[in-house]
Image (cartoon, helix red, strand yellow):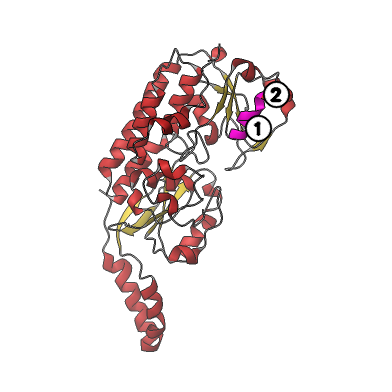
């Protein structure tokens, strides 16, 4: 159990000292501000995934995810507690979510994609905790990440969410934090089981026989991410190899590459973010020599309500690795994708998908597999 601190020592005493210093007149000036946002009682101390001991409310009822992966965690773990979004959902996403989630206010993000957080707008929603993203890049600018929340006296709690391996432990810690332990255990258990099933199917594939994959991002398919980046880890987890070998320089990624380089890589499969590019690349003569097109392995990534692979990198990767492993190695990893999709969405989003919704999600998966 995390250590518990005395609420009086963390909340009441500092105010008492301030009252003595300011006197009655000063206190009258401050009362409207305290009435606007009195702040939660800091009743316990919990160690976050950055190793920091953080004082948090005994009961957290209004958490805010400071970046898209953290808000994604809340969608699955405690959707009833979410107070706002980082970025709007894509059109059509509402049908794949619990009612009301897509209508929440968009408040921005402290890191990654999304507009900058407006502390005043956030304050109006009375958050009692900010969940922040712990990764190698957050270490470079902790003040920039935590600044908007310090201005409004909201504690910041870091969760590590870079890789799919991180998610079970993050769910479990967040579950203890929010009083959702049973729910967290269920979600973490699914992820661990999915990873184990895929790993058992693909781990023995020799390196020379692993499908070479190019991760095509952007409207022209000429942005990508390094094999070392968390943005592309689904490729390796599914038993394939990313053709772009490098070390990620930024958290956002999406590094530009030339078509000539893609032709030299000769990928056997294209993992595609932009659905318009996926729909037109087969008619573009400049891409005709890429082996993936001849193999029929242009793979548009399902993306409702969240992307199955990346942007944001989330728990959706537990389904994404199964989808990709099945698309690349159907004999090694047989899968009733429609049934697994229904199961996943019911568990993580609390929605029962119709046959039409499932078809819309997975209808982009090609039937032809890599040789």
Question: Relative to residue 282, is residue 78 drawn left or right?
Answer: left
Find the magenta span and give its range.
274-282
Using the rendered image of the protein, determine whether residue 225 is visible from the camera's viewpoint: no
Relative image position of residue 154 (x, y in whole percent) = 41, 62
The residue beneath circle 2 is: 287
Relative image position of residue 190 (x, y in whole percent) = 33, 31
Dot 1: within a 10 Å radius of its alpha carbon, few (fewer than 14), some, or many (20 or more) residues? many
Label 2 secondary element: helix
Do the residues under discs 2 and 1 have CB atoms within 8 angstroms? yes
Judge whether 224 appears above or below 34 on screen.
above
Gap between marks 2 and 1, in whole Å? 10 Å
For the point 43% across and 48% down, the residue is 71
Label 1 secondary element: loop
Using the rendered image of the protein, determine whether residue 362 is visible from the camera's viewpoint: yes
Question: Relative to residue 6, is residue 203 drawn left or right?
Answer: right
Relative image position of residue 309 (x, y in whole percent) = 50, 33
Judge whether 196 appears above or below 231 on screen.
above
The residue beneath circle 1 is: 221
Judge whether 251 appears above or below 324 on screen.
below
281 falls in the magenta region: yes
């Amino acid at each position: 159990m995390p250590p518990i601190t005395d609420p009086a020592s963390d909340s009441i005493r500092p105010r008492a000292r301030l009252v003595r210093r300011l006197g009655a007149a000063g206190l009258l000036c401050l009362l409207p501000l305290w009435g606007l946002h009195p702040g939660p009682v800091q009743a316990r101390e919990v160690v976050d995934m950055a190793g920091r001991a953080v004082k948090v409310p005994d009961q957290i009822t209004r958490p805010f995810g400071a970046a898209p992966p953290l808000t994604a965690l809340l969608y699955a773990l405690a959707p009833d507690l979410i107070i706002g979004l980082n970025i709007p959902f894509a059109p059509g996403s509402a049908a794949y979510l619990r009612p009301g989630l897509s209508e929440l206010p968009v408040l921005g993000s402290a890191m990654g994609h999304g507009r900058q957080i407006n502390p005043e707008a956030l304050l109006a929603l009375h958050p009692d905790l900010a969940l922040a993203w712990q990764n190698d890049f957050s270490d470079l600018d902790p003040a920039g990440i935590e600044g908007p929340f310090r201005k409004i006296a909201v504690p910041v709690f870091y969760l590590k969410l870079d890789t799919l391996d991180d998610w079970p432990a993050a769910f479990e810690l967040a579950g203890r934090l929010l009083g959702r332990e049973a729910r967290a255990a269920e979600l973490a258990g699914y992820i661990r089981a999915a990873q184990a099933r895929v790993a058992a199917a693909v781990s023995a594939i020799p390196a020379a026989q692993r499908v070479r994959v190019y991760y095509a991002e952007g409207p022209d398919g000429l942005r990508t991410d390094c094999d070392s980046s968390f943005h592309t880890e689904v490729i390796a987890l599914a038993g394939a190899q990313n053709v772009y070998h490098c070390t990620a320089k930024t958290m956002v990624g999406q590094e530009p590459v030339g078509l000539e380089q893609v032709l030299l890589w000769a990928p056997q499969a294209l993992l595609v973010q932009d659905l318009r590019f996926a729909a037109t690349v087969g008619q573009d003569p400049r891409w005709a020599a890429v082996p993936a097109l001849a193999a029929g392995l242009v793979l548009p990534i399902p993306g409702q309500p969240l992307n199955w692979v990346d942007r944001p990198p989330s728990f959706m990767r537990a389904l994404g690795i199964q989808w990709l492993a099945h698309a690349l190695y159907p004999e090694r990893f047989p899968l009733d994708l429609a049934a697994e999709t229904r199961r996943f969405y019911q568990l993580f989003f609390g929605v029962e998908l119709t046959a039409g919704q499932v078809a819309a999600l997975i209808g982009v998966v090609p039937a032809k597999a890599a040789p």
